[in-house]
Image (spheres, grey):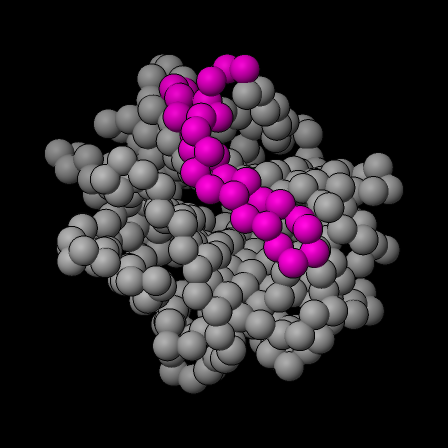
Amino acid sequence: MPFSKLTALCFVIAAAFLPFSVSFQPGTDYGLYKTTNLYNCSGYFSTSNVTVPNSVDTLPQLSANTTTGWERWDFFVYGSLPIVMRWSQDTESEHDSAPLGKIEMVISVINGKHIQTSVSGPLSYQNQEFKEISIGSNTFQWDNAGQWYNVTVCAEGYTLVLSIYSAMLDTFHPNVGYYNGRLSSVGAPDWFGSIPIPRGHSFGYLLTPDNQNITVGGTAVLKHTFSEQSLSQYLIKYSSAVAWGYSGSFLDTLLYYQTNETSGAGHVPAYLGRAISVPGSEDVWQSASAIYAVTDDTALYQLTTDSVQGIIGDTLGQFFDLGGGMTTYYLLNGMTLGPFNGSAVNGTVVGLFEVYQSP
């Protein structure tokens, strides 16, 4: 991992905007013009200075009554039970349907099988001392600091309750064209998103229809994306991944998107961070080191995906939206060799790999 390429840079956020068609929530960071890709300096911090969390960014940015547009929140949890949980309003491939909230969830493995379930209902939210999004009686809530997220979902006899702690209090915004949160090319239909929790720790439980109470916990990520147009109008496919590389000395988090637009353009936003364990307590991570976040910057980050190497493993779940788009989730398993204190350290890689294919 190219930690050695990090240098001490300062950055400036300029108050410049494009005439976006998306109407953002007041107070969000979306659409701000940034003048640099590298957000921080290398070193050790009790909290990250990549991007200060903005709790408003996680709120719905599209009106719940809109008939054009879609929005989605993805929770990825990897630990005792790998989990993908998608909260959405409308679908990526069809942007002009009647508004509908939906939660889709896939969990592996319970009694030797994958559990895939869903529940639908009206989506609503509140923006007060704490923030909340609800679909029917299901909720996820977070505080103004963007530090704690609490999720409760009941679907087809399963009840999942999770508390997620944002371990390093940082967020990641892709910035195609240097516009904060932008995932699509400038001039293409507006597609925005952020990762409010790049590195979270989760704990909770899962109740099954046969009254099993299963403890759930592990590392966690929350992604948020939205657009007023269907992806199929300008996107062929995209892939996204969260990979955790860990040893007894460090925990690395890699997040990226790789997009392929119909125009031939493509973009690669990526986030890479490291947490150092507390001496004598390998499960407690106290500091961040050498964190950076880049978009389309091959001098700092080069992405190669090669399934032949065996890192991309079993299919965890597959989802089809109303417009015919298909999203597939795969488990990641492998090994990594990362620098630590001047030498190479072997570590284990786990995570999730997502591929969206337009119809």
Magenta includes 320? yes
Figure quadrant of residue 210 = bottom left
Where residue 169 appears, as percent x and y from the top left, is 39, 56
| In front of the other: 76 or 265 | 76
**Image point 50% across, 66% down: which residue?**
102
Where residue 89 appears, as percent x and y from the top left, is 58, 68
Q: Is residue 163 visible?
A: no
Give the total of numbered labels.
Answer: 0
Give above or below for 11 relative to 133. above
Is residue 130 found left or right of 112 in the rendered image?
right
Is residue 222 found left or right of 66 in the rendered image?
left
Figure quadrant of residue 190 = bottom right
Question: Residue pushed farthest left?
Answer: 280
Magenta includes 227? no
Where residue 10 appears, as percent x and y from the top left, is 59, 48
Is residue 90 found left or right of 52 in the rendered image?
right
Q: Is residue 88 visible?
A: yes
Where residue 137 appears, as percent x and y from the top left, is 37, 77
**Image point 35% across, 47% down: which residue?**
115
**Image point 38% across, 19% down: which residue?**
335
Give above or below for 101 relative to 190. below
**Image point 78% across, 70% down: which residue?**
21
| In front of the other: 105 or 72 | 105
- Magenta segment, principal secondary structure? strand
| In front of the other: 60 or 87 | 87
Residue stretch in magenta: 308-336
Figure quadrant of residue 112 = top left
| In front of the other: 100 or 145 | 100
